[in-house]
Image: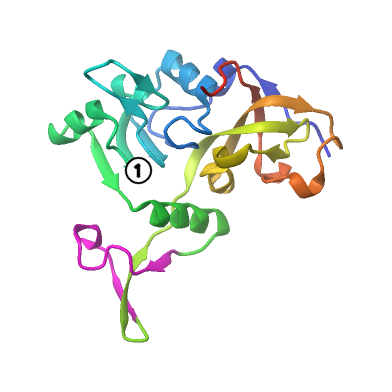
Amino acid sequence: MIAKPVLSAAEAAAKVKGGQRLMLGGFLGCGSPLTLIQALLEAGPRELDLVACDAGIHDLRTGRICAQAHLIRNRQFRSLCVSHIGLNQELQRQLNAGETAVELAPMGTLAERIRAGGAGLGGILTPTGVGTEVAAGKPLVMVADRPYLLETPLKADIAFVKARRADRGGNLVYHGTARNFNPLMATAAALVVAEVEEIVEIGALDPDAVHTPFIFVDFLVRAERLER
C-alpha cells in the first residue's frame, strides 16, 4: 500500500475550480470538514454546485454561522442539492430572491442517489415524493401496481469528507454519527480529500474498523479545527 499525499488545507482548496460539483460530508457541523471549508472560504472559488445533507446554520438574528453556511454567505455556490435548509436563514433569503438555485431532496433519497452514483447504478426507485412537488419532471415507474419515482444518481468532481482517524495509506475511520454522509460521498467523486484528526502508520488500524477503504481516497489533510 502506497502512502497518500498529505496536503495543507490551502493546497486541497486550490484543487477546487469554479464550475465544479462539490460534495461536503457532515450534518449541521457533525462530521463536516471544517478546516477544508475555511480554506475554501479563503480560496474563494465560485459558481460551484454543492451536494450536501444540509446548508449549515446561519441565524441572521444571532449571527451564528456553521459549516458550509460560511460559503453560502460568501456566494460561492450557484446551486445546491440538499435536504435541510431550515437553519440557514441567509440561504432561505437567497432562494426566495431567486439568487441561488436550490434542489430540495428527501434525506433518504439524497443518500441513495449518492450511493447510486458511487456504485455505478443508473438511479433508484423510491415511493417517497410521489404525488408531491418532489415528483415534478421525474419519470414515474409502476412496480407491482405501486408508483415509484426514478431518481437519478449523483456524482461530483470532488468530495471533501471528514474522518476521525486515517492511516497513511488513506483508510478512514469515522467517529459515531459523524459517519453520516461521509462514506457515501467518498465513493461518488472523481477526487476525494479526507480531513482527519489523526494520521497513523499503515497497519495500525484494525481492518474490521475501516469504514472507507484507501482506494477511494486521494489526499489527506490534517484537521486544524475540531468539531464543537
| Residue 75 appears in view | no
Label 1 Cα crowd, 10 Å radius (few <14 / some 14-19 / many 20+): some
Query: Badge 1 is on which residue?
Result: 82
- Label 1 residue SS: strand
Query: Residue 152, percent across and down?
Result: 39, 59
- Tell me which corner region of the image, top left, top right, bottom left or bottom right, holds residue 20: top left
Point out the residue furthest to the left here. Answer: 97
- Could you tell me which residue is drawn at 84 percent across and 29 percent down? 201
- Could you tell me which residue is drawn at 44 percent across and 51 percent down? 154
Query: In screen coordinates, is 23 left or right of 220?
Result: left
Q: Which residues are magenta?
A: 123-142
Query: Residue 48, percent across and down?
Result: 37, 32
Q: Is residue 34 above or below residue 203?
A: above
Of residues 38 and 205, the one drawn nearer to the viewer in this rendering: 205
Query: In screen coordinates, is 139 left or right of 133?
Result: right
- Tell me which corner region of the image, top left, top right, bottom left or bottom right, holds residue 197: top right
Query: In screen coordinates, is 43 left or right of 149?
Result: right
Query: Residue 123, percent across and down?
Result: 43, 64
Q: Is residue 26 above or below residue 143?
A: above
Point out the residue furthest to the top here. Answer: 42
Query: In screen coordinates, is 124 left or right of 215?
Result: left
